[in-house]
Image (tube, helix red, strand yellow):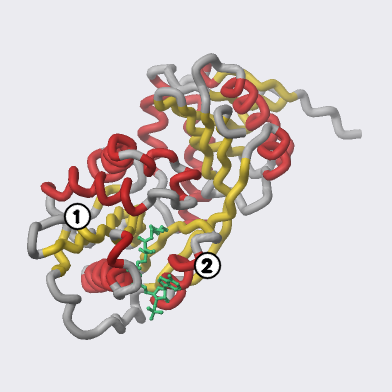
Amino acid sequence: MASAVQLEILDLRHFSASSLRPVLEEESRVWSERLHWDYRSSADLLLQYLDSRILPGYVALENGRIAGYAFCVYEERKAIIGDVFILPHVSQGVEEELLRHLIDLLQHSPGIERIECQLLLHTHGLHEEVFRQSGFKLFRRLFMELELKDFCEFSSGPMPDGLALYPWRESDYHPSSYLIADAYEGHLDSFINDQYRTVSGSLRFLHNIVRFPGCGLFDPLSSRTIVRSRDGSLSGLLLCSRVREDVGHITQVCVAKHLRGLGLGLRLIEACAANLRDRNFAGLTLTVTEENANAVELYRKIGFVEKHSFDAMVWDSRHP
Ligand SMILES: CC(C)(COP(=O)(O)OP(=O)(O)OC[C@H]1O[C@@H](n2cnc3c(N)ncnc32)[C@H](O)[C@@H]1OP(=O)(O)O)[C@@H](O)C(=O)NCCC(=O)NCCS
């Protein structure tokens, strides 16, 4: 007769980086297999945080052995659930238990008004019940990929009058925050990620992407801007990071509201893809909210294919 499994959920801060290293190594393998991302630098960063014992989260022990973990980070009055992961032999219920503990901790933490979570590695619907029961709203997101070996640009002709396409320059950093806040005003994605709602939030987003290895390593060579010649103001932006030696990931693409529908989004993405193809990259990936139909349509038109779908979750005590 099989003996019952004894499950304990304990504070992540009681565990050393070395005790969690095998779980993170397995997680890196899954990121690489499922999404073609090299997760090792993110795992190293996580191990550093674990070493300093400051990362809030939980570890699941099955019969005294580490079975998985979940963690979050705080950003003023917001908490972001970073990830939840269990080893392959462990039952899915353990992942749910980890999430329940973490959500309960955050919803009862004084000062935390909002919780955001995007479980990129986990298939759409997998943890729907846990999040819905706790009052979260869920949004289906798509992970799309473009194979670069057969990629050909099809946008032709000159840029619209008075606009020019440039590679990313360091001086674009601050103007980009104004463009992002403006482009996402009233947009569904600014409900999922509230950084997009303000210039200061957009700067924080840019800091994570451009200066800090928050999502791969920022790749200025394939990142592009569209600039208005008259006054040098920014009308479009595409940021790309290197998530594997030969895979790029678009972390941001947006066009000023009054210039949409002129083919600028198409040009930004094609310029990025052509740059990566010419540097022998194999693929370009991105994520998009399924309801953002214009963007999904644009990506499909270029040749991006949906490879995976996952959920974004939001809980806001001020707007239940
Ligand atoms: C998504 C976005 C970057 C597209 O930029 P854009 O310059 O307006 O797009 P383009 O003019 O290059 O559109 C190219 C194609 O996309 C699709 N598309 C774009 N806008 C569309 C719309 N309003 N309705 C239907 N299809 C649309 C069409 O296939 C279009 O080709 P067509 O003009 O031959 O029909 C822009 O709408 C934007 O900044 N949105 C807000 C931010 C955002 O959602 N970013 C993406 C997050 S994943």
Q: Return the residue found at the far right.
A: 1
Observer-nearest residue: 23 or 52?
52
Q: Amino acid at mark 1?
A: Pro
Q: Quadrant of ligand 1?
A: bottom left
Above or below 55: residue 253: below
Amino acid tagged 2: Glu
**Image spot of residue 96 (x, y percent):** 69, 35
Residue at x-position 39% and y-position 49%: 185
176 and 304: which one is in front?
A: 176
* Residue drawn at the location 36% of the way across and 57% of the way down: 249
Mark 1: secondary structure: loop
Residue 162 coordinates in the image, percent (x, y): 12, 70
Residue labelled with disc 1: 220
Residue 306 tag number: 2
Image vertical order of residue 1 relative to residue 220, above or below: above
Say above or below: 192 vs 258.
above
